Image: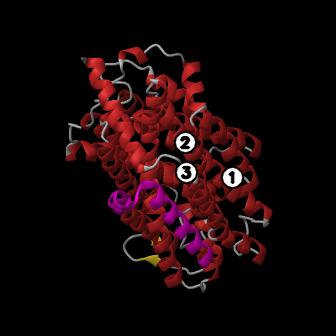
Amino acid sequence: MNLQKISLKEKIGYGFGDAASSMFWKIFGMYSLFFYTDVFGITAAAAGTMFLVARLWDSFFDVFVGIISDRTKSRYGKYRPYLLWFAIPFAVMGAITFFTPDFGQTAKLVYAYITYSLMMVVYSLINVPYASLLGVISPDPIERNSLSSYRMSFAFIGSFITFMLLQPLIDFFAKTFDPESVAQTSKAVESTVSTSPVGWVMGVGAIGLICVILFLLCFSWTKERVTQIESEKNVSVRQDLKNLLRNAPWWILVATGLASLLFNAVRDSVAIFFFRDYVQVNYKMAGTGWDLTTIYFLVGQAANLIGVMAAPSISAKYGKRKTYMIASLMAGLLSIAFYFIPNNITWILIFQFMISIFAGYVLPLLWSMFADIVDHQELLTGRRATGLIFSSSSMSQKLGWALGTALSAWILALFKYAPELAVQSPQTIFGEHISVSLIPAVCCLLAFVGMYFYPLSDKKVKENTEQLEVKRANSKA
């Protein structure tokens, strides 16, 4: 095959898009439960239900966005214009979501449902088309693996930016604009992120400005190259959906991806509570404003990045499916071990690093496999429903985080978490402990089982690509 190589600038530009998405996604995944219980002021059970309801319906909205973007016609292409259209709404809606109004409990809960749901809608409108770009920048599986690796690498860089900046920004804005709130903070919790509502809305707003710049650079530096064959263009939405629901590898990959993302969601969303209540070390790194939770997140992201960067070469040698299975199994076994290690920060950070390396292998493989599913379905049906299929990957991501964050909140409620207490009960601390260890381990083992049944080997993917190139060449002749 004589396929065009993608420039380094374009790969970096593509990566910028997921850096922006990941910056907000980490706020939602790792800080939102703490925000809604300890800053916004609703119960853990109410927050968990809200996460599930808002993200559940929005997960299916992703499919609608995929269908619409597949049929978008503009001088910028099908998927790139969404980066231009929704970059600013993305940032604005993020700040509105983390605003705390002076309402009663019922009105606050209504506000939370509306703003969180709208934020997820805007996230879909920019992230589903962005994800679909992977399927149209290049038809080459090797280049797609590379693009997916750049995407995941920059996603973790975006996460680094969030973890490095969010807590210091919130603390800075709290001290500047809400000094009374800072003065009232007890010494028992002064090492954790501020609970100042002003600090939160302004801190998230500052992160949003960075996201706007990154989305616009992604729009400017990328190009769509893979186009539909003429005979594909008038296929109905109903037929697209029917084709997708008959695609067995798609079902397996969605389920497997759901389990992998559930692992991350449960583990990450409870980390702040775990460190404050179980580890109980009052520490902030001088000159940074980082507490141990932030350092734990940064260690995890550094290890994730190592795994992401190593994934293409390892999967090229052993195959995507086998690499995915081994990484899931190892992350699961290490998560079980995490429950039994001493309550010592050195042990905790060592295991966080090891677990996160294996978790890092999984994500770029997952996105690359969805691109392979697009090719597989095109070969079977003659229809390249890129946006629809990639929307399903976004759907599995949101379902994973929705179920994971909701499960974490319900576990906190089940084990009697009380945000007004400076010291939680042993029962609550046990619930937090299993939420960062044993429950994520179960999710990893489910991902391992799912990938065992995945039928698209590397050999089959290569054969599909070669056949599609011949088909496209013949259609142009």
The correct choice, above or below, for 111 with respect to 454 in the image is above
Q: Quadrant of the N terminus?
A: top left
Circles 2 and 3: CB atoms closer than 8 Å: no
Task: Give 475 or 371, whichever is nearer the viewer.
Answer: 475
Q: Which residue is disc 3 drawn over? A: 28
Q: Quadrant of the C terminus?
A: top left
Q: Which residue is disc 2 drawn over? A: 249
Task: Give 32 or 462, whichever is nearer the viewer.
Answer: 462
Instruction: Give yes or no for residue 312 being in the magenta stretch.
Output: yes
Residue positioned 63% across, 43% down in the render = 101
Element carrying mark 2:
helix
Rendering quarter of residue 437: bottom right
Say whether residue 318 is visible: yes
Element carrying mark 3:
helix
Instruction: Give yes or no for residue 260 being in the magenta stretch.
Output: no
Q: Which residues are magenta?
A: 308-337
Residue 398 location (% of width, % of height): 58, 44
Disc nearer the start of the sequence (2/1): 2
Residue kind at label 2, given as amino acid type: Pro
Residue kind at label 1, given as amino acid type: Ala
Residue positioned 71% across, 74% down in the render = 429
Element carrying mark 1:
helix
Between the residue at mark 1 and the residue at mark 3, the CA separation in whole angstroms equals: 12 Å
Between the residue at mark 2 and the residue at mark 1, the CA separation in whole angstroms equals: 28 Å
